């Protein structure tokens, strides 16, 4: 799950000529890697890829701060 999300971020959301080293614990918003528009694209990708509808009340920083947070959130929804 982590690798799928990391690859999407690196290949679709980060516009850079340089290779980006992204870890599951990196702060996506605080570090400036993603902005609010990129985050919404990421949510759309997650919903499509993992066949899950993310309700508005779950779109909080705690669930989407890092790839690890996203993975933990997704695992909690699949239980």
Image (tube, helix red, strand yellow):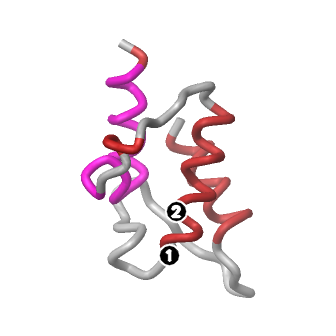
Q: Is residue 8 left or right of residue 28?
A: right
Q: Residue at x 32, y 24 (%)?
A: 76
Find out whether residue 78 is within the magenta segment: no
Above or below, comparing residue 11 to residue 50 in the picture = below
Neighbours of disc 1 within 10 Å: few (<14), some (14-19), many (20+): some
Work out which residue is located at the far top of the displayed protein and give it: 79
| Residue 39 disc label | 2
- Residue 49 position, x and y percent, is 67, 34
Q: Residue at x 55, y 49 (%)?
A: 43
In the image, the segment drawn in magenta is 61-77
Q: Choose top left, top right, bottom left or bottom right for residue 61.
A: bottom left
Above or below, comparing residue 71 to residue 79 in the picture = below
Residue at mark 2 to residue at mark 1: CA–CA distance: 6 Å
- Residue 12 position, x and y percent, is 72, 63
| Residue 17 disc label | none
* Discs 2, 1 touching: Cβ within 8 Å: yes
Q: Choose top left, top right, bottom left or bottom right for residue 6.
A: bottom right
Q: Is residue 23 left or right of residue 58?
A: right
Above or below, comparing residue 75 to residue 56 in the picture = above
Q: Nearer the viewer, residue 16 or 35?
A: 35
- Residue 28 position, x and y percent, is 42, 67
| Residue 35 disc label | 1
Question: Which image quarter is the C terminus in?
Answer: top left
- Residue 1 position, x and y percent, is 53, 35
Number of dots carrying numbers: 2
Q: Residue at x 73, y 63 (%)?
A: 11
Secondary structure type for disc 2 = helix
Q: Residue at x 59, y 75 (%)?
A: 20
Q: Choose top left, top right, bottom left or bottom right for residue 71.
A: top left
């Amino acid at each position: 799950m982590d690798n799928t999300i990391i690859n999407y971020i690196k290949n679709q959301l980060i516009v850079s000529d340089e290779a980006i080293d992204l870890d599951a614990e990196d702060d996506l918003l605080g570090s400036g890697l993603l902005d609010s528009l990129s985050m919404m694209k990421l949510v759309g990708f997650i919903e499509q890829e993992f066949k899950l509808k993310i309700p508005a009340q779950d779109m909080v920083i705690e669930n989407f701060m890092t790839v690890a947070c996203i993975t933990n959130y997704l695992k909690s929804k699949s239980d």
